[in-house]
Amino acid sequence: ITHMQEFYSILESRHVASVYQPIVSMEGGEVFGYEALSRGPAASPLHSPVKLFELAERADKLYALDKLTREQAILGIDGLARHQRIFLNIPAQILHDPDFSPGQTLALLQRRGLTPNNVVLEITERSSIEDFSTAKKVIDHYRSQGYRIAIDDAGAGYSSLQAIAEIQPDYIKVDRSLVQGIHRDKVKEYILETFVWFAKRLNIKVIAEGIEEAEELEKLIRLGVHYAQGYFLGRPDATLKPVTPEAKAT
Ligand code: G
Ligand code: G
Ligand code: MN
Ligand code: NA
């Protein structure tokens, strides 16, 4: 069967599930929350969310796949502590989906004993946000219900400083391309320093992604980054896992 047929079959049978990767507080090393990352069936060529979303876009089914992955991400949560947060990936286009409503999201959260306070919406721009005023209205509406907002992939691709200025998120997730090798790259260090500096002035917290080595983590702690995520601290897993032992030791 073709990949497109496989895509429709996955969509109909709801065969996507989420894995959860810990986001760790630099102060104290506790798990602050988890990012939900979608996966297709294990043996499928559409296991990767990148492939799944590519086909969804080709089939004009982005809203449908996004709704399914969001439902599965929330319903798959088991054992989140009251003070912990779940980070959900929200492509900017989804903000225009009339079905993307706080009410619908709240109903899902309630099924797992969670509240909007437990949720951070990670907004990603895959292309420029065309109708920005509508997008901003949706974000503000979610916010008024207690949801937090993050700008994902900051410093890379289309995730612009303009988006940060307009949205004034609670969190900035710095893209892993600026994090990896930061302990031996002065330019990356200065860029992270800049993010931390202006984030502090706006009362935004900085999350560094893609940490794979102890040296990167140490440098980021010294730069004053608030939260960290990456294979060094914990891989995405079907269950909510604590920080890996070797990271805890540093
Ligand atoms: O988990 P992985 O590194 O393979 O994810 C690849 C990309 O897919 C990342 O950019 C991630 O943000 C995106 N992604 C993962 N899960 C979801 C999801 O449930 N919804 C959306 N919109 N994107 C996702
Ligand atoms: O676009 P977004 O930031 O949501 O993408 C997150 C992606 O990064 C996920 O696919 C996740 O599997 C991946 N990821 C998480 N930690 C690491 C890491 O330490 N190294 C690398 N290379 N990828 C990571
Ligand atoms: Mn993300
Ligand atoms: Na990212």
Image (cartoon, rainbow, N blue to C red):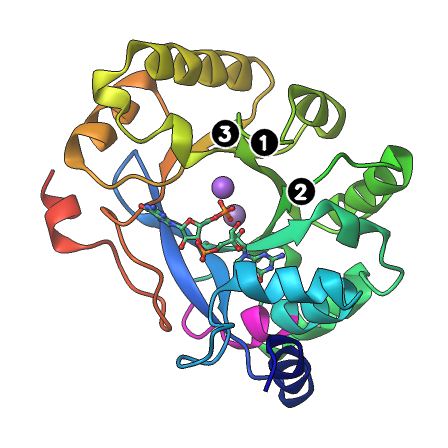
Mark 1–mark 2 CB contact (< 8 Å)? yes
* Whether the residue under disc 3 has CB within 8 Å of ligand 4: no
Q: Is residue 113 visible?
A: no
Q: Is residue 191 left or right of residue 29?
A: right
Q: Is residue 17 above or below residue 224?
A: below
Q: Is residue 149 above or below residue 75?
A: above
Q: Is residue 193 left or right of residue 128?
A: left
Give the labeled residue for mark 1.
157
Mark 1–mark 3 CB contact (< 8 Å)? no
Q: Nearer the viewer, mark 3 or mark 2?
A: 2
**Amino acid identity at mark 1:** Gly
In the picture, the quarter occupied by the N terminus is bottom right
- Dot 3 surroundings within 10 Å: few (below 14), some, or many (20 or more)? some
**Amino acid identity at mark 3:** Lys
- Residue 72: image tag: none
Q: Is residue 28 above or below residue 239?
A: above
Give the labeled residue for mark 2.
126
Give the labeled residue for mark 3.
205
> Element at badge 2?
loop
